[in-house]
Image (spheres, helix red, strand yellow):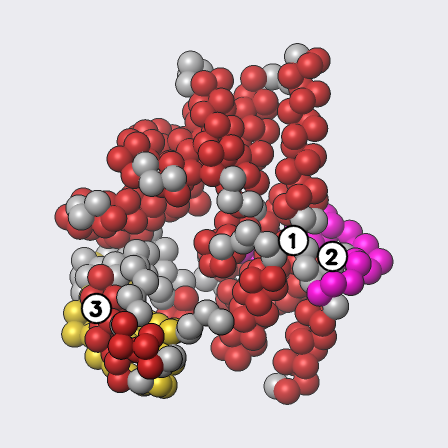
């Protein structure tokens, strides 16, 4: 165990170093895709082995500071059955992201993970974004790219802008792709249109335009219901609708989508069972004045509709002043319920951790 953890630390050790001798990026992508296919089919052992292979290959190709390496590392953390390894990888990735100017912690990480195949091809967000910027410029000048391919490139560029927190720029790219795709009746182009609506909604949400985001998410949902009723875009559209409806106080509307996610098997295992919607706890003024910091782990039951019931403190490290805001934050969380034999069931002993740190 100690030897394995030491090896993982070694892979992250040269954060500022340049990449080593390049391995075959196609092999990294093949192993990455195989891990996710195996995981989705319930074969966690194969998923773990393939994710580990991708992780090792990525360490020979990218610097540990490259977003491609971080994304592949997080995929390994997802599928390994060693909690200590998973926590170590996640902590290291978050630490590296914290050093990157302008990045927004977990939100940026979530987007990077979603762009893993693109990042494997280009290495870094900056390189990928520049490549797509160049391709779009050339396509516009030469008028050689079919409209759907141009729209696809704009969506890719918008995702990269979103990942680097340029939300207005991202919104513009998605809007342009929608204008190109909206008139088409081709089924594949319409699936691309649904993806553009989904991502424009995410950019709008980040800019505080939640009502407009819901409208775009419902447009995406209508297309996907017709053409692609399962898959990653449908899962993400439903997840974003839960967040948007909870943000606007429409918990009843969020329930439909919580149930869909649960029924569709969107909950891999207990270690990954986290809330779809959550609100950060407020830092008590008394705790701030006293310089109190710490962590609170709250244990709760998630009912058949994904609401939190009976939250209670499991462990406390630090001041008791941190308990009340942690319990309040836990009650506001929204989960996808677990399903057994086609029926939603309550899940006991679900845990959430709340960390309180005062910025220095």
Q: Which residue is mark 1?
A: 68
Q: Is 164 situated left or right of 69 in this image?
A: left
The 10 Å Cα crowd at callout 2, few under 14, some 14 to 19, many 20 or more, is many
Quadrant of the image for the N terminus? bottom right
x then y, percent, for residue 329 = 25, 66
Q: Residue at x 60, y 17 (%)?
A: 146
Give the camera-side residue of 229 and 197. 197
Sooner in the amino-acid sequence: mark 3 or mark 1: 1
x then y, percent, for residue 24 = 78, 52
| In the depicted structure, whether residue 227 falls above or below residue 166 | above
From the viewer's perspective, is the residue at label 3 or at label 1 nearer? Answer: 3
Q: Residue at x 31, y 69 (%)?
A: 283
Inspect the magenta stretch and tell me whether residue 274 lies in it.
Answer: no
x then y, percent, for residue 357 = 42, 73
| In the depicted structure, whether residue 259 falls above or below residue 292 | above
Dot 3 lies on which element? Answer: helix
Q: Could one spot residue 340 in this view of the protein? A: no
- Give the magenta range: 15-37
Res 155 label: none
x then y, percent, for residue 266 = 36, 55
Res 62 label: 2
Sooner in the amino-acid sequence: mark 2 or mark 1: 2
Dot 1 lies on which element? Answer: helix
Q: Which residue is mark 3?
A: 328
Q: Quadrant of residue 42?
A: bottom left
Inspect the magenta stretch and tell me whether residue 30 lies in it.
Answer: yes
Dot 2 lies on which element? Answer: loop
Sooner in the amino-acid sequence: mark 2 or mark 3: 2
Q: Quadrant of residue 51?
A: bottom right
């Amino acid at each position: 165990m100690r030897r394995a953890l030491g090896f993982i630390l070694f892979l992250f050790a040269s954060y500022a170093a340049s990449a080593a001798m390049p391995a075959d990026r196609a092999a990294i992508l093949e192993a990455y895709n195989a891990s996710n296919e195996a995981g989705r089919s319930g074969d966690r052992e194969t998923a773990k082995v393939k994710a580990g292979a991708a992780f090792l290959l990525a360490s020979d190709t990218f610097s540990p500071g490259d977003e491609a390496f971080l994304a592949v590392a997080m995929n390994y953390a997802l599928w390994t059955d060693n909690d200590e390894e998973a926590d170590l990888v996640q902590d290291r990735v978050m630490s590296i992201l914290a050093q990157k100017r302008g990045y927004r912690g977990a939100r940026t990480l979530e987007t990077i993970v979603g762009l893993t195949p693109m990042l494997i091809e280009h290495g870094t967000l900056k390189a990928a974004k520049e490549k797509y910027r160049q391709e779009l410029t050339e396509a516009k000048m030469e008028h050689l790219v079919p409209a759907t391919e141009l729209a696809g490139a704009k969506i890719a560029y918008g995702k990269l802008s979103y990942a680097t927190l340029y939300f207005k720029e991202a919104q513009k790219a998605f809007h342009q792709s929608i204008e190109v795709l909206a008139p088409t009746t081709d089924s594949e182009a319409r699936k691309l249109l649904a993806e553009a609506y989904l991502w424009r909604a995410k950019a709008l949400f980040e800019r505080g335009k939640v009502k407009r985001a819901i409208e775009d998410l419902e447009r995406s949902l209508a297309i996907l219901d017709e053409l692609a009723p399962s898959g990653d875009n449908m899962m993400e559209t439903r997840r974003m609708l839960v967040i948007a409806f909870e943000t606007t106080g429409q918990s009843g509307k969020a329930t439909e989508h919580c149930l869909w996610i649960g029924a569709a098997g969107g909950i891999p295992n207990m270690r990954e069972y986290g809330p779809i919607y959550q609100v950060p706890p407020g830092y008590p003024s008394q705790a701030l004045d006293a310089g109190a910091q710490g962590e609170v782990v709250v244990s709760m039951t998630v009912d058949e509709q994904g609401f939190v019931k009976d939250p209670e403190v499991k462990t406390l490290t630090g001041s008791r002043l941190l308990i009340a805001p942690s319990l309040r934050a836990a009650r506001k969380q929204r989960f996808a319920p677990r399903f057994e034999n086609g029926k939603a069931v309550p899940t006991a002993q679900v845990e959430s951790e709340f960390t309180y740190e005062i910025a220095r």
